[in-house]
Image (tube, grey):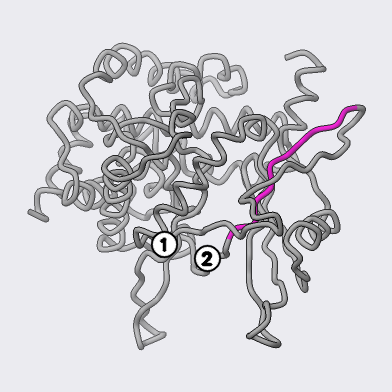
Amino acid sequence: MSQINQTLRKWNKPAFSEMQAIGLVEREFGLSVSEIKPLPSYDDQNFHLWVACSEGNEGGVEEYVLKITNCEESQNPGLVEVQTRVMMFLRAEGFPVATPRFTKKGEIMFIESIDVGSATQGYLVRLLTYLPGRTVATVPVSPPILYEVGQLAAKLDKTLAEKFHHPLIKHLHRDTFIWNLANVPLLEQYIPALNQSRDLEVVKRVIEQFKLIIVPKLSKFRPCINHGDLNDHNILLDTHSASPESPRYRVSGILDFSDMSYGYYVFEVAITIMYMMIESEDPLGVGGHVLAGFESIVPLTTEERDALFLLVSGRFAQSLVMAAHTILLHPENKEYLMITAKTGWKHLAKLFEMGQEGVEKIWFETAKRYT
């Protein structure tokens, strides 16, 4: 990568100061910020804000997330707008998702330009409602929660496929988007970031099998719009038990729609299974519970079920390779970027050690018990 290109990629992630963020909110939304805290993120920049409540709730505070989109996606405002319209639609349909606060001009987002190096870069800015709760990554996840997460993934995709219509929906056809699961073969350009030969060989094996087996079958999968990133940090849980000593959890929030794109139903369940494995004490057992929940809403076809093992493996490869690549660009964000890698390499190696038949036996027999 040339020095110029590397510098441009470093600018991809916004780097607004807290004072700049507060200034944006006060200027564009007319809100008085009482407290601000940075939130971890992959390539966007997020702040958790506390602001004084509007009239009628004197003395109270409201919470928001200020989301500043990376410069690459900021150059495609149609994409960001349709993602935001999807969030508004899903909220109206009863899904627990954030919605945007409109600016003083009545807009759901705006461009803020700042100087970066010797150039000026524009970033799309939105103020979203804050969703409270604990992330799946922070609690021991039980089979009932995994089942509910699987159900939620299927309901989300099915609702969008059947009911969502918008003139900007064409922007969700992201044919070269690296996080679309169909694009596992595009990882080949990023694998030089892997230094360990054993990890490199596993990823090469995943890519080759994906090209050989999955790519020719894509036309047989049922298409839909995917959230695309239902990971253990993007799903929130809330307690609904009277006993604090033995809390029971339910899904209370879905975060981050920036990876949304056209894909297939089987992509969503594969992505969800992969991410639910990350912090699990029984990672191989996760898939059956998520699959059972998903299939209670959208049963998979034979072709889709046969592809599940390689699709889960493909998502592991995407997450691990792109984390290694992004760390080279943003070493200061290494701790957040390494979240999946801490257990991900081990899980991917275990999948291939057991093989497709052995893993599917666990998943499918677990799912069958629900029916």
Please indicate whether residue 200 sits to the left or right of residue 227 in the image. Answer: right
The residue at the point 75 percent across, 68 percent down is: 31
Give the residue number, with chain letter if any, for mark 1. Answer: 96
Stretch in magenta: 119-128
| Crowding near the residue tagged with mark 1, few <14, some 14–19, many ≥20 C-alpha atoms within 10 Å | some
Could you say where residue 50 lies in the image, as x and y percent from the top left? 70, 71
**Quarter where residue 123 is shown:** top right
Q: In this view, does 66 lie above or below 241?
A: above
Could you say where residue 369 lies in the image, as x and y percent from the top left? 9, 54
Could you say where residue 263 lies in the image, as x and y percent from the top left? 35, 30
Could you say where residue 28 lies in the image, as x and y percent from the top left? 76, 57
Q: Is mark 2 on a helix, strand or loop?
A: loop
The residue at the point 72 percent across, 63 percent down is: 37
Q: What element carries label 1?
A: loop
**Quarter where residue 354 is shown:** top left
Give the residue number, with chain letter if any, for mark 2. Answer: 131
Please indicate whether residue 368 sits to the left or right of residue 167 in the image. Answer: left
The residue at the point 48 percent across, 47 percent down is: 85
Please indicate whether residue 74 sits to the left or right of residue 81 in the image. Answer: right
Q: Is residue 369 above or below residue 74?
A: below
Indicate which disc, 2 or 1, sits on the residue closer to the N terminus: 1
The residue at the point 34 percent across, 34 percent down is: 312
In the rendered structure, which amino acid carries the disc numbered 2? Answer: Leu
The N terminus - image quarter: top right
